[in-house]
């Protein structure tokens, strides 16, 4: 259910004049400050992979081409709108300008009037706001546009009654919130930064040095070569044997778990299958036991065999002091195994790039995060 937003303003003659001005400033539209994005739980948003058309006439897939793997800000407009669409677009334009050209945030504006909004009209509407690269104004076939609007909470039977909503989300962490598009640009910026933070890896794992050799030395010192034992009874030095020179996926589990561990492991076997032969070569999958007192190599072996784990994925246990050290380094230590977190860490120690994802996130999204981990941001 979409959270209640501020009702559209009653527009005075002065405000109407501002609305008609292409370069209307967001602060000239006085609206109550929206509730902080962090005060509400994340929305449940499932982005459909429908084919739409952007303002250049290019066909794009909403999920695959625009949303997957990125932080996005999505709003809903139509070019013949005489009230909120221009000031809302001006607000979003200021947000994009504030973030700068190197921002990895993608902006998406979807029409509510597919019968009239051709790509050419969308381009003319957008031009006065000088949208930078990474901002798509979308139209397309009516059924596909409606599917996107419904899924994103933007559909209204009467386009004139639409709300000035900006949907902000991060497709890696699957964190979504709605913000008032007529409020201060800082509210949208704050929401963007919060959802970006939700997908960021622990700061301790970030780049430690400028050159490769120093980065490797820093990573080795942080991760340590603590010895752990896998499901086959083989001993590994954590950094040297499993992390160094590879992309890694790390999660936390235990074999006596009655809740999330089995479903998560089964889900991640699909990720392993999608990554194919790279797992065990340039990609390593690691599951750290949060219950070393009971998780022996034998019990881990039984657990992994039952759930279809393939070579290249290491389920690790060991002496309590050893596994505890590594768990604390990675933020996975808990006194009570049942309270362990279900975060998936995805990283590359050589570059210091790390992200967090729910372990049950879409298989395709996890795979994309792995494959594009070191893309420019």
Image: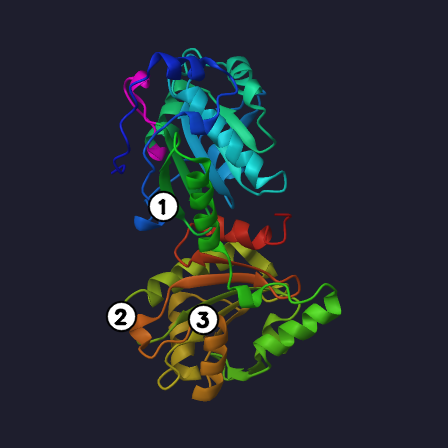
Report helix, strand or loop for mark 2: loop
Residue at the image position 41 percent from the left and 21 percent from the top: 85
Report helix, strand or loop for mark 1: helix
Q: Nearer the viewer, residue 29 or 353?
A: 29
Residue 298, horizontal then vertical, whole percent: 41, 83
Instruction: Tell whether position 348 is magenta.
Output: no
Disc 3: which residue: 331
Cα distance between the residues tagged 3 and 1 = 25 Å
Mark 2 vs 1, N-terminal side: 1
Q: Is residue 341 left or right of residue 64?
A: left
Q: Are marks 2 and 1 in contact (CB under 8 Å)?
A: no
On screen, residue 128 above or below 41: above
Mark 3 vs 2, N-terminal side: 2
On screen, residue 98 above or below 298: above
Within-10-Å neighbours for mark 3: few <14, some 14–19, many 20+: some
Q: Main secondary structure of the magenta part?
A: loop
Report helix, strand or loop for mark 3: loop
Disc 2: which residue: 258
Which of discs 3 and 2 lies nearer the camera? The answer is 3
Disc 1: which residue: 37
Q: Is residue 168 left or right of residue 216?
A: left
Residue 331, horizontal then vertical, whole percent: 45, 71
On screen, residue 217 above or below 124: below
Mark 3 vs 1, N-terminal side: 1
Which of discs 2 and 1 lies nearer the camera? The answer is 1
* Residue 181 visible in this rendered orientation of the protein: yes
Q: Are marks 3 and 2 in contact (CB under 8 Å)?
A: no
* Residue 170 visible in this rendered orientation of the protein: no
Range shown magenta: 151-163
Cα distance between the residues tagged 2 and 1 = 33 Å
Q: Nearer the viewer, residue 147 or 158?
A: 158
């Amino acid at each position: 259910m979409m959270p209640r937003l501020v009702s559209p303003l009653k527009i005075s003659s002065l405000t109407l004049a501002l609305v008609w001005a292409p370069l209307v400033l967001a602060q000239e539209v006085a609206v109550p400050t929206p509730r902080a994005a962090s005060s509400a739980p994340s929305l449940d948003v499932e982005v459909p992979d429908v084919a739409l058309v952007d303002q250049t006439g290019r066909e794009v897939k909403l999920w695959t081409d625009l949303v997957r793997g990125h932080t996005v800000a999505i709003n809903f407009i139509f070019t013949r709108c005489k009230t909120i669409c221009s000031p809302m677009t001006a607000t979003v334009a200021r947000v994009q300008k504030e973030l700068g050209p190197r921002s990895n945030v993608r902006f998406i504006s979807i029409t509510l009037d597919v019968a009239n909004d051709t790509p050419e009209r969308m381009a003319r509407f957008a031009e006065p706001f000088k949208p930078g690269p990474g901002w798509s104004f979308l139209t397309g076939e009516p059924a596909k546009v409606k599917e996107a609007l419904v899924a994103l909470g933007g559909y209204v039977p009467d386009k004139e009654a639409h709300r000035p909503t900006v949907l902000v989300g991060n497709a890696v962490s699957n964190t979504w919130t709605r913000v008032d598009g007529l409020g201060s640009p800082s509210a949208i910026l704050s929401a963007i930064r919060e959802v970006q933070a939700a997908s960021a890896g622990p700061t301790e794992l970030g780049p430690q040095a400028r050159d490769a050799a120093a980065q490797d030395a820093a990573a080795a010192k942080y991760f340590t070569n603590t010895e752990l034992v896998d499901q086959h009874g083989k001993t590994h030095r954590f950094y040297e044997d499993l992390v160094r020179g590879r992309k890694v996926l790390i999660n936390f589990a235990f074999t006596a778990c009655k809740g999330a561990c089995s479903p998560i492991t089964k889900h991640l076997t699909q990720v392993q299958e999608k990554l194919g032969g790279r797992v065990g070569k340039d990609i390593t999958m690691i599951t750290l036991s949060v219950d070393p007192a009971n998780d022996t190599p034998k019990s881990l072996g039984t657990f992994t065999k039952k759930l279809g784990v393939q070579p290249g994925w290491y389920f690790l246990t060991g002496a309590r002091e050893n596994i505890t050290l590594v768990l604390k380094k990675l933020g996975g230590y808990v006194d009570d195994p049942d309270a362990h977190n279900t975060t998936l860490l995805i990283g590359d120690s050589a570059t210091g790039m790390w992200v967090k994802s729910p372990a049950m996130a879409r298989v395709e999204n996890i795979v994309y995060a792995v494959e594009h981990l070191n893309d420019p941001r």
